[in-house]
Structure formats: C-alpha cells, structure tokens
Image (cartoon, rainbow, N blue to C red):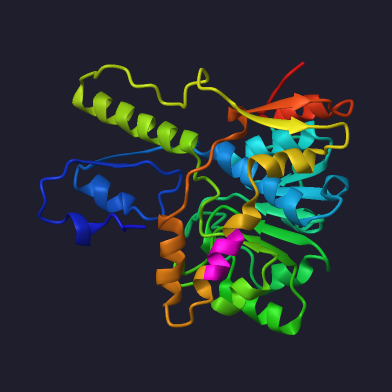
Amino acid sequence: MTSIDRELLANTPIRFVGSATIGTDHVDLDYLASNNIHFAHAPGCNASAVVQYVIAALCATVRGWRDKSVSVVGCGQVGGRLLASLKALGLDCRVYDPFLTVEQVPELVSFNEALSADIICLHTPLTLQGAFPTFHMIGERELSEIKTGAILINAGRGAVIDSQALERKLSEGACPQLILDVWEHEPAIGRELLDKVLLGTPHIAGHSVDGKLRGTRMVLDAFEQWLGVRSPRVNGNVPDTLEKTPITVSDRSSLETVVLSAYDPRRDFADLRSAFSDRDMPAGKAFDAVRTAYQLRQEFNHFRIQGELEQGLGEELVTLGFSVDR
C-alpha cells in the first residue's frame, strides 16, 4: 500500500487526501495535520466483508467450530459486528478491548482470559503509542500462553503479531494453528510461514464489491463536504434490486455448506500457494500479483437460498445476511 507521507506530498499543491480504507497506518497523520492537508478515510466500509471472511474461514477449516469458545480482540467496527454474528449463532464469546467497559460489552475479559479461548480473532488497528499499543501485541509470551490446538486468526493488521516470534514458535512446534489474511512485512511474506498456516490469503478479507463501493462513497462524501459542494447522488451500495444469485439447498445442507457455496477462502489460499510455487518469482511480487488479480466477491446479501432447510438454519442464514425463500 502506498505510504502517504512527506516523501510523497512535499512540494505538491495537494490539500486533500482520501483513502477508501479502514486503517490509517499507511498515512502520516501528523504530517498532514501540520501542513493543513485534510484527510478522509472509510472506517467500517468493508467490516461486513471481513466478518464474512472469518466465518467462511472457520467453516472451511475448523471442524465443530460452533462448539468452541471464541475471543474477539478489538471490538470496533469489525470486531463488534463479528461478535454480534457469533453470538447470534450461539457461540461462547469473550472480548478483549481496553477502551470498552463491561457496561458496553458484557463479554469483556482480561487479555489473558481472551488468550485462553479455542479461537482468537484479532481485529485491532495498528498503533505504536498510547497506553495500549497493538504493535507486536502477540509476541513470544502470548503465543506460549495460547493453548495447544487453538486457532489464531488475524484479519486485522499484520504487525499485531510479531512474525519473528511466530516463526520461532512454529520451528519449535509449539504454535497455535494460524489463519492469516494479513502479514507483517507484506507483501514480502515468508514462504516457510505460508507453508505452515492452516489458511493464508493475500490481504483480501475486506475485498467485496459492497465494501469497495461503500468506501468510495464515504471518501466522496467527505471530499464534497470539504469542498462545500454536492454532486448528483451516487448509490454507495450494490443495489438490492439486482437479481440475487441462487443457492439451492436440501434438508442435509448445513450452515457450513451454504456459506462455502457463497464464498470459499480455500480457493484464495490455493491461488496464493500456486503463485508462491514459482521459486524464481520474489515473494513480494507473487503476493501482489494474486492480490491485484483478485476477483471482488459479493457479500452474503446478494445470495438467495432456495430449497428445504433444516429447522432453525434459515434463521441463522438470515442473521448472516442471506435471503431465504420461505
């Protein structure tokens, strides 16, 4: 991702910078502020897509995941929506977020308690300063405290996990199973690490058509507000009037089979491993090639479920955003 900083902007007439992204760790906010350059981004634009990625990854890789305890580390735009979805599906949930209270989130626990769950999902921003910096918040000590057989999912920011500590623990055979969409030092990720993850994808968890359109709309709105003008309204979402893609089910279908019919992240994993199999191609180039060629996916609300469903499954699918024929 392009760094937006002094090197890029010095001696230019630029007065407004927009980034249709959730994170801002690629932006030197202090430089922009000190040079009177207005900044806008799009927090939450692809939160639904990331939540669906996590649920699809669990459906694809973890047998009996709905009977396991889950910790959500960072309960903001993405983490909050993930928590709501997991609770609606009946999972045993806990939350670590030092900026929230038990009154706001009853599932709030300490960091150590969060690390004791069967599945740990990281959804924090990347911060270097303050009382609770997230840079390398998962290091050697934390990896050692996660129990054997647990699943660690990072679809937030790569440098939240200390990659050197991760590689050491992997070499010792004492590391949780890993589902990684983001990686420290990406795009130049380690081939050895990719070989050892349960599921790995090239930073595409939020890459849905809806997320891209929402992000564009949010930045455009901010730009117009800054200019003090208003353009003809542009729909910021994929219209619900579009014909939905049907998924035909039977009374033997499960939540997992339906979710994976809409989106199966194992295909993205296969594409990434295929690109990395060319040892003559630098890792960074292989990673970027897969990410650049990624075909944006539709979110669950663009799928219509038709057929006979097991009792209760229809309600669960509606909770995840699917349309279900009654």
Image label count: 0
Quadrant location of the N terminus in the rendered image: bottom left
* Residue at image point 64% right, 70% down: 139
Q: Determine whether 191 is above or below 157 in the image.
A: below
Q: Residue 312 in the image: x percent, y percent?
A: 86, 26
Q: Which residues are magenta?
A: 269-274
Residue 254: quadrant of the picture: top right
The reply to whether residue 188 is in sight is yes
Q: As drawn, is 245 to the left or to the right of 71?
A: left
Q: As drawn, is 111 to the left or to the right of 122?
A: right
Q: Residue 191 in the image: x percent, y percent?
A: 55, 77
Quadrant location of the C terminus in the rendered image: top right
* Residue at image point 88% right, 29% down: 310
Q: Is residue 272 magenta?
A: yes
Q: Determine whether 241 is above or below 295 in the image.
A: above
Q: Nearer the viewer, residue 156 or 277?
A: 277
Q: Is residue 31 magenta?
A: no
Q: As drawn, is 271 to the left or to the right of 37?
A: right
Q: Nearer the viewer, residue 203 or 118?
A: 203
Q: Residue 154 in the image: x percent, y percent?
A: 62, 57
Q: Residue 84 in the image: x percent, y percent?
A: 71, 33
Q: Determine whether 254 is above or below 98 in the image.
A: above
* Residue at image point 83% right, 40% down: 91
What secondary structure do most residues of the magenta stretch adopt? helix
The reply to whether residue 45 is in sight is no
* Residue at image point 84% right, 27% down: 309
